[in-house]
Amino acid sequence: MSIFKSYDIRGIYPSQINEEIVEKIGRAFATYLSAKEIVIGYDMRTHSKSIFKALAKGIVSTGANVINIGLCSTPMIYFANGTLKPDGSIMITASHNTGEWNGLKLCRDKAIPISGKTGIKEIEKIVFSGVWKTSKTKGVVKEHDISEAYAKHIRSFSKLTRKLKVVVDFGNAVGSIEIKGIRDLFEIIPLYEELDGTFPNHEANPLVTETLHELCRKVKETGADFGAGFDGDADRCGFVDDNGEIIPMDLFTALIAEDILKGGPQTILYDLRSSRVVKESIEANGGRAVMCRVGHSFIKAQMRETNAAFAGELSGHYYFRENFTAESQALAFLKFANFICETGKTASELLRPLRKYYATGEINSEVKDVKSVLNKIRQKYSDGKIVELDGLTVEYDDWWFNVRSSNTEPLLRLNLEASTKADMEQKRNELLAVIREEG
């Protein structure tokens, strides 16, 4: 299986990704961008520093310089890219994957992501052709601490009127570094703060709701204002309200949008799998709601095209124009706290009016012929409003659904929502029968 994926480079260390291949990737990346300077940061995985050394060795061999910002979160590498103005950046991480994995998240200048369709495949070709730039004069590796500048930037958005009590599950990962610069503004009750790239306590993945159960219990036990659980590289976060209830990530998008829109009309992007209430809430608060397809490279491009202030994805990625149209979970964390302070309401009170529809969550089904099943669904539900932005979205007055295929597996992913629980369950079963009939 290739380590060159749709959105990044990722594999198991050292059998799939190792110092030898990474040095070649460094040469290829610098060659592809005709780079003079590249920013690199890395997470706390046990092999990340070794991979950094190999990557930097490959880059400097082309004559390009490396700016090493060291141990950091992925949002911090985006901030460094945008502020230091290099030709590109690389974050060494495998995100939420377990400790034996590692990888590279690539950007060109202005923190614009490089995906499979916008450069990763070309870089892969350079790697395996061995035709890359060489230079008699090697580049140099320079150290740069971005943390103080990032902290100052995030703190500039604080409107806090009191010190909220927040339980934070760091998952032994770099979320502690992501919010380091605003930590003193809160009373933080930490879980699993010690950096440990083997993830000894639980998978650092807030999409797996089981990983948030201890966070939920701790919020209730301590009477905290809310809870937050970061993923492995802190570009995603799951939030919990004051009752210890998990906040659905689309409803969190609606909350942050409402806070942003207090400053005046803005364009807000929302993941096409989001609850209908997200669009309704954005528009009710004077915003322009624009549906976007799934995937960070698509969302960031669409944010630039529409000059959007904010975008939220159902996977817990929250994107801000203030962080070069990239993720900043420290900013999401702070803006949520601002909203609680400004309204004088609890997190659960803010959420209550948004909990008005019934959703299935994402349901995966293995199918033999994805196109055939999609065509069958398109015909059966042709009386609905059909949108084909990403897979197939069909909308009716009191319910809607999206079916989209996986990039890597023969799977169809169903998200469905209805005005009543009974309708949601009936329509869910109806759709799954169609999907799985040919599976």
Image (cartoon, grey):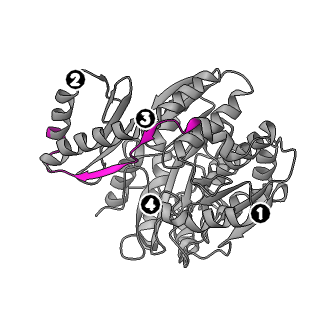
User: In the structure shown, which secondary structural element does the residue marked by tag 2 occupy?
Assistant: loop
Neighbour tally class for label 4: few under 14, some 14-19, many 20 plus, Cα within 10 Å: many
Q: Which residue is disc 2 drawn over?
A: 382
Question: How far is the residue under mark 4 from the one under mark 2?
Answer: 47 Å
In the displayed structure image, the side of residue 107 where residue 170 appears, left or right: right
- The residue mark sitting in front, 1 or 4, is 1
Which badge, 3 or 4, is on the more N-terminal residue? 4
Q: Which residues are magenta?
A: 354-372
Horizontal and vertical percent position of residue 365: 25, 52
Horizontal and vertical percent position of residue 396: 34, 24
Question: How far is the residue under mark 3 from the one under mark 4?
Answer: 34 Å
Tag 2: amino acid: Ser
User: In the structure shown, which secondary structural element does the residue marked by tag 1 occupy?
Assistant: strand
Q: Nearer the viewer, residue 137 or 111?
A: 111
Question: How far is the residue under mark 1 from the one under mark 4?
Answer: 40 Å
Which badge, 3 or 1, is on the more N-terminal residue? 1
User: In the structure shown, which secondary structural element does the residue marked by tag 3 occupy?
Assistant: loop
Query: In the rendered image, which quarter is residue 391 located in?
Result: top left
Neighbour tally class for label 3: few under 14, some 14-19, many 20 plus, Cα within 10 Å: many
Q: Which residue is disc 4 drawn over?
A: 25
Which badge, 1 or 4, is on the more N-terminal residue? 4
Tag 3: amino acid: Leu
- Identify the residue at the far front of this view: 422
Is 362 covered by the magenta stretch? yes
Q: Which residue is disc 1 drawn over?
A: 188
* Identity of the residue drawn at 37% across and 30% down: 399
The image's mark for residue 272 is 3
Tag 1: amino acid: Ile
* Identity of the residue drawn at 48% across and 56% down: 207
